[in-house]
């Protein structure tokens, strides 16, 4: 029997983020269904800033409307954050949407650490700095100052986004999903790049420790795009985990 793998991409990504994984799964009993999340790819932006719960609501509705039969969830980065939120809901309710057979978290976001305060400070500086650098005599410093600031605090996503998506980024990154991990009861497999600087390996290790029965696969020399760089290895693990 065919199993649908619903793939949720990361912030700034799109359904095309899973091209390599889709190719690696060809010929197997697992087929990928990967939507563009609201605000990304070809999807419309939300009409207001969204939280993680809003994205989870959307994903749950998407699954209800597009998935027949058995399925599993695969979330990369921001998509992993959504998967964690959904898994917590399923653990708390016996009347929710039918649960997936398995959850695959790939460089998943959701662990808020001290460095995130630095990022949020950067968002504020990026906003307020425009006012400061608009002062006559300082305008010529704008290009250099912005490059230095964004390199320091990694707020490129924020600078490129619309106002709605900027506020959405702040909402989703400020929520710490750590307390939800212990509630996850669905079989879970984690994939992580050892050199990931966006969601460091320590986040994956913490998730593995707190999600009961979960397994963590670590790939040396790989950064945040582990789902693309190690698509073949990941596909093998996915197929094995979903064998009927």
Image (spheres, rainbow, N blue to C red):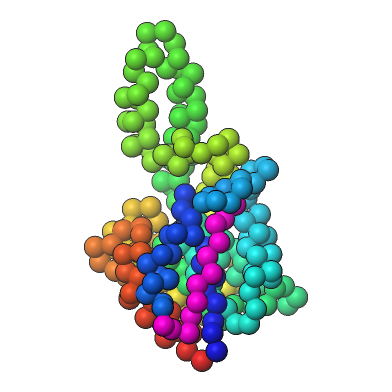
Q: Residue 204: in sight, yes or no?
A: no
| Most distant residue in the top direction | 136
Q: Which residues are magenta?
A: 27-38
Q: Residue 164: in sight, yes or no?
A: yes
| Most distant residue in the left direction | 221
Q: Main secondary structure of the magenta part?
A: loop
Picture coordinates of residue 65 (x, y %)?
Answer: 69, 69
Picture coordinates of residue 158 (x, y %)?
Answer: 48, 39
Is 168 positioned to the left or the right of 226 in the image? right
Rendered residue at 72%/73% (across/down): 96
Of residue 113 and residue 80, the one placed in the foreground of this image is: 80
Rendered residue at 34%/31% (across/down): 147
Is 150 positioned to the left or the right of 77 in the image? left
| Most distant residue in the right direction | 95
Picture coordinates of residue 93 (x, y %)?
Answer: 72, 73
Quarter occupied by residue 183: bottom right
Rendered residue at 31%/58% (across/down): 223
Rendered residue at 69%/64% (across/down): 61
Above or below for 207 versus 170: below
Residue 208 drawn in magenta: no
Is 171 positioned to the left or the right of 195 in the image? right
Quarter occupied by residue 221: bottom left
Residue 34 drawn in magenta: yes
């Amino acid at each position: 029997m065919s199993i649908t793998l619903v793939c949720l991409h990361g912030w700034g990504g799109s359904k095309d983020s899973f091209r390599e994984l889709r190719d690696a799964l060809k010929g197997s009993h697992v087929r990928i269904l990967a939507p563009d999340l609201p605000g990304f790819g070809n999807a419309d932006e939300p009409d207001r800033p969204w939280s993680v719960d809003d994205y989870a609501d959307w994903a749950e509705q998407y699954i209800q409307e597009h998935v027949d039969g058995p399925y599993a969830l695969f979330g990369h980065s921001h998509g992993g954050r959504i998967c964690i939120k959904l898994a917590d809901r399923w653990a708390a309710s016996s009347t929710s949407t039918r649960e997936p057979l398995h959850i695959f978290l790939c460089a998943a976001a959701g662990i808020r650490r001290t460095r995130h305060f630095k990022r949020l400070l950067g968002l504020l500086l990026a906003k307020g700095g425009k006012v400061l650098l608009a002062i006559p005599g300082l305008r010529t410093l704008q290009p250099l100052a912005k490059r230095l600031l964004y390199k320091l605090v990694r707020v490129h996503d924020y600078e490129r986004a619309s106002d709605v998506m900027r506020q959405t980024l702040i909402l989703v990154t400020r929520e710490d999903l750590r307390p939800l991990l212990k509630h996850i009861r669905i079989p879970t497999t984690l994939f992580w790049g050892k050199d990931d600087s966006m969601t460091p390996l320590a986040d994956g290790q913490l998730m593995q420790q707190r999600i009961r029965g979960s397994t963590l696969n670590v790939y040396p020399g790989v950064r945040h795009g582990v789902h693309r760089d190690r698509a073949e290895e990941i596909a093998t693990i996915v197929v094995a985990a979903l064998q009927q």
